[in-house]
Image (spheres, rainbow, N blue to C red):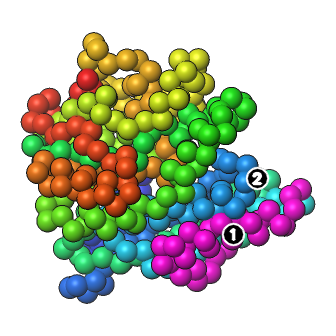
Amino acid sequence: MLSGLPLISDPDLIVGIENADDAGVYKLSDDLAIIQTLDFFTPIVDDPFTFGQITVANSLSDVYAMGGKPLTAMNIICFPINTMEISILREVLLGGLDKMREAGVLLVGGHSVEDDELKYGLSVTGTIHPDRVLLNRGARAGDALVLTKPLGTGIINTALKGNMASDDLVAKSVQCMVELNKKAADLMIKCSNVHACTDVTGFGLLGHASEMIEGTDVGMVIHSSFVPIFHEIQEFVEMGIIPGGLNRNRKFRMDMIEVGPDCPEWIVDVLFDPQTSGGLLISLPHKEAKNLVMKMNDEGIKDATIVGEVVTEPKGKIKVF
């Protein structure tokens, strides 16, 4: 999509749009850089306050994935003023503010337009030391892969639209989506040898993992039985109740994936499920990964676990067992 665009180069641009990184990073001084990101989408839950919470948690996640601290945000609002009560927008914005306060982020403005469909999100600015920026590439052979949240929110949201998801399952999914990645990121940046990190969102676990190794000299192994998931979703997947984005993710990246004979087919679908406000996927040495998971579990991030490792062969491929 970006091929052929006359991009402007700058020696202080640490991360631009040339690669599929989580956010842009620009160096202001020898010890300070800013992180910039933007995200917005349509409602995925019925409650407007909860929708605002989820959207903000999702928008802030890219800054956390790069090891940074989000500081300020600006609202992005599309609203059907003639067909929807303004009180709904108020609840969305209150939900967003609730999560911004939890994150210590200051709302400094925004922009709204009239639209046929409600959309909400944030433009976020954060800070980081220029030498401590975490990219989605840089994973090294021998690293372990840590995932901090369970998979399946896209499938659950699809089941919810068909009135097939139980209240209990929806509540667990919502709790996962509103949870900030702040605590996980704070623990991650205390590790001395994190080699790469990304957050698992719209491309699913395998899609974002593919970005981490594409064009590199390493591959990955994912142990499907270790991956945290909402186990209630198996029935939905086997019934074909899956989001359209899952099929697009699978079609786009399946040539990089090798599935072992003992891996259930429905699990592969879950690994491609597009997530909203998903967890962090972190690549770091095994010993540090074990210690990190232990600390995360102790701090209440109960689903954090080692789901695989980075390997020398096959290069640019992911084996799923």
- Above or below, comparing residue 320 to residue 284 in the picture: above
How many circles with numbers are drawn on the protein? Answer: 2
Dominant SS in magenta: helix
Whether residue 105 sits left or right of residue 294 in the image: it is right
Of circles 1 and 2, the one toward us is 1
Q: Which mark is residue 93?
A: 1
Disc 1 crowd, CA 10 A, few/some/many (<14, 14-19, 20+): many
In this rendering, does residue 208 appear at all?
A: yes
Distance, label 1 to label 2, CA atoms, is: 16 Å
Residue at the image point whose x is 68% and y is 48% from the top: 45
Of callouts 1 and 2, which one flags the residue occurring earlier in the amino acid sequence?
A: 1
Mark 2: amino acid = Glu
- Above or below, comparing residue 172 to residue 236 in the picture: below
Q: Which mark is residue 117?
A: 2
Quarter placement of the C terminus: top left
- Disc 1, SS: helix
Q: Pick whichever, 281 or 19, lies toward us.
A: 281
Residue 13 appears at what percent x and percent y?
Answer: 29, 72
Whether residue 88 sits left or right of residue 313 in the image: it is right
Residue at the image point whose x is 64% and y is 62% from the top: 52
Q: Is 133 part of what is drawn in magenta? A: no
Residue at the image point whose x is 26% and y is 47% from the top: 146
Q: Pick whichever, 291 or 114, lies toward us.
A: 291
What's drawn in magenta, residue-wise? 83-111
Residue 79 appears at what percent x and percent y?
Answer: 77, 61
**Residue furthest toward the right?**
82
- Disc 2, SS: loop
Q: Pick whichever, 1 or 247, lies toward us.
A: 247
Residue at the image point whose x is 53% and y is 41% from the top: 153
- Above or below, comparing residue 180 to residue 204 in the picture: below
In this rendering, does residue 77 appear at all?
A: no
